[in-house]
Amino acid sequence: MAPAPSKTAAVQFEKPTVEDGAAMWELVNESTLDQNSAYKYIMMCEFFAETCVVAKENNQLVGFVTAFIPPERQDVVFVWQVGVHSSQRGKGLASKLITELVNRSGCKDVSYVEATVTPSNEASQALFRSLARSFQTECEVSECFSEDLFPEEGHEAELTFRVGPIKK
């Protein structure tokens, strides 16, 4: 069974709106996450709100997860990006965001959480392994995209982390 979402005292989890897109983009630009256009975040909020979550403290965005359900694999929610403001790091907010996502009605048929993670991103690797432990399931890692597929210099390979099956 998926653990129940928990809320820290002042942090609220919500479905994003298009107005959250700019704050998501700003959070990413203040971090080491891969940068996408502001348009990407606005589109995710508009067209994928059922599979995205924002965390707010005092009405200020402090974290988010963007995700989608691949059309050919309705039992998977693919986590594109998890962003956590520096003030919230070390509080388990990323895990809480993904747990909130998995427990949403839009993910009722989801049995697996997938994401791609670079070999050097130890924090994200630890996040998905921790999720597997909290869901009392497996975390399988496999090759996904080799570094030679990326046009920019220095992009690492991407590994697929697959957590599941998740029992709800």
Image: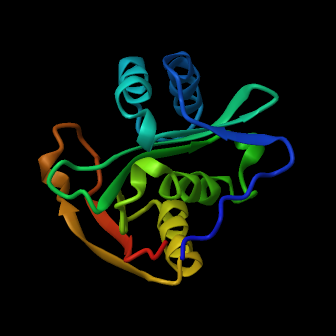
- The quadrant holding residue 59 is top right
Image point (33%, 53%), residue name: 78
Colour scheme shown = rainbow
Q: Is residue 131 above or below residue 63?
A: below
Image quarter (top left, top right, bottom left or bottom right) of the N terminus: bottom right
- In percent of width and height, residue 103 lies at 53, 58
The residue closer to the viewer here, 29 or 93, is 93
- In percent of width and height, residue 126 lies at 54, 70
Image point (42%, 43%), residue name: 51
Q: Is residue 99 above or below residue 163?
A: above
- In percent of width and height, residue 39 lies at 37, 18
- Which residue is most to the right? 9
- The quadrant holding residue 20 is top right
Q: Is residue 60 above or below residue 54?
A: above
Q: Is residue 46 left or right of residue 92?
A: left
Q: Is residue 62 above or below residue 113?
A: above
